Image (cartoon, rainbow, N blue to C red):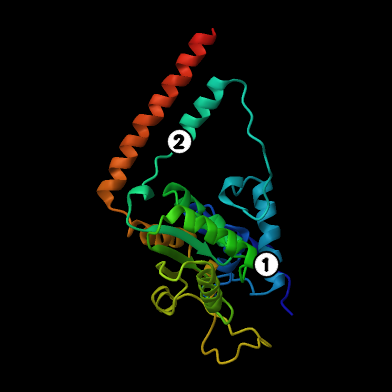
Amino acid sequence: MRQRRTKTQMQTLRNQILEELRDDHPQSVRHVFYRMTDPRLKEPVEKSEAGARTIQNLLVTMRRDGSVPYHWITDSTRRGWFVDTYGSAADAVEQAAAFYRRSVWDQTDVYVEVWCESRSIAAVIEPVTSRLAVPLYPCGGFASLSLIFNAVEQMKATSRGRPIKVIYVGDHDQAGVLIDRSAETEMRQHLPADMDLSFNRVAVTPEQIDLMGLPTKPPKKGDKRGGWKGGTVEAEAIPAGVMRDIVSDAIEDFIDPGLLRTVKVAEASEREYLASIAQAMRGEGA
């Protein structure tokens, strides 16, 4: 049983968290926890429920005392449900101008989605998928049949017969390496036989474990999926910024850079046009 940390050890742990978050945010609490389990740190936490509670409680304290800005921590597992309303039609058009996005994917040869194993990972990579306007699906472990069926219906409607490319992020462990395979197998049950579907696991891979020196832990005891060799690595062990770069690079491999620049220029111009309409509407109502 681990002894209670001294004040000096707790301050070291606080400093480690600040260093991790200062240049690499937002991150989920779970992501910070796994980063703090790295045995190479001066004050690592144990990979256990107790270790997770230590980080969770410390992040609560650090946010409340102002050490960690609230927006440095993201949580996509809990969110409110809202109905958008407007004070006037001009307000609605103005909002539309602010959020207007021109689709680059209508002009590409493939249809792209990003899937990931957990909501905590989704929260970390969502800024990338939002910036590049790519659908993001957190499986929550092995995806439910309803999630996959509804996702495939959306795929069929949006892909318009183009090859479907799924970029995947998940753990490297007994279950993690099977989740994307299971999802792909189930998707194929609902897609036409001649529709091109491919999954590309961009993290975590054995090569990344070696290249980044990611900390590993033994396989879970009692897991019925036998035959696992070596250690296991959670996706959260990859630094959040590095993970966002990995996903961004994987998505942008399917977009011509010139096309993306052209679309962004047109988008900015059309956004200005919508804003001018809202301004004109306000003038007419004056």
Identify the residue shown where x is 68% and y is 47%.
Answer: 64
Mark 2 touches mark 1? (CB < 8 Å):
no
**Image x and y of residue 263, in percent:** 32, 41
Front-lying residue, 160 or 166: 160
- Res. 144 visible in picture: no
Q: What's the amino acid at mark 2?
A: Tyr
Mark 2 to mark 1 CA distance (whole Å)? 40 Å
**Image x and y of residue 63, in percent:** 65, 49
Q: Quadrant of the N terminus?
A: bottom right
Q: Residue furthest bottom?
A: 227
Q: Is residue 133 left or right of residue 5?
A: left
**Image x and y of residue 100, in percent:** 45, 35
Q: What's the amino acid at mark 1?
A: Ala
Is disc 1 surrounded by few (<14), some (14 to 19) or many (20+) residues within 10 Å? many
**Image x and y of residue 209, in percent:** 44, 77
Identify the residue shown where x is 51% and y is 63%.
Answer: 115
Q: Which labelled disc corresponds to residue 214?
A: none
Question: Element type at marker 2?
Answer: loop
Question: Element type at marker 1?
Answer: helix
Front-lying residue, 241 or 179: 179
Q: With respect to residue 38, does 230 lie above or below?
A: below
Q: Which residue is mark 1?
A: 52
Q: Residue furthest top?
A: 286
Disc 2 versus disc 1: nearer the observer:
2
Q: How many marks?
A: 2
Q: Which residue is mark 2?
A: 100
Identify the residue shown where x is 52% and y is 75%.
Answer: 185
Q: Quadrant of the C terminus?
A: top right
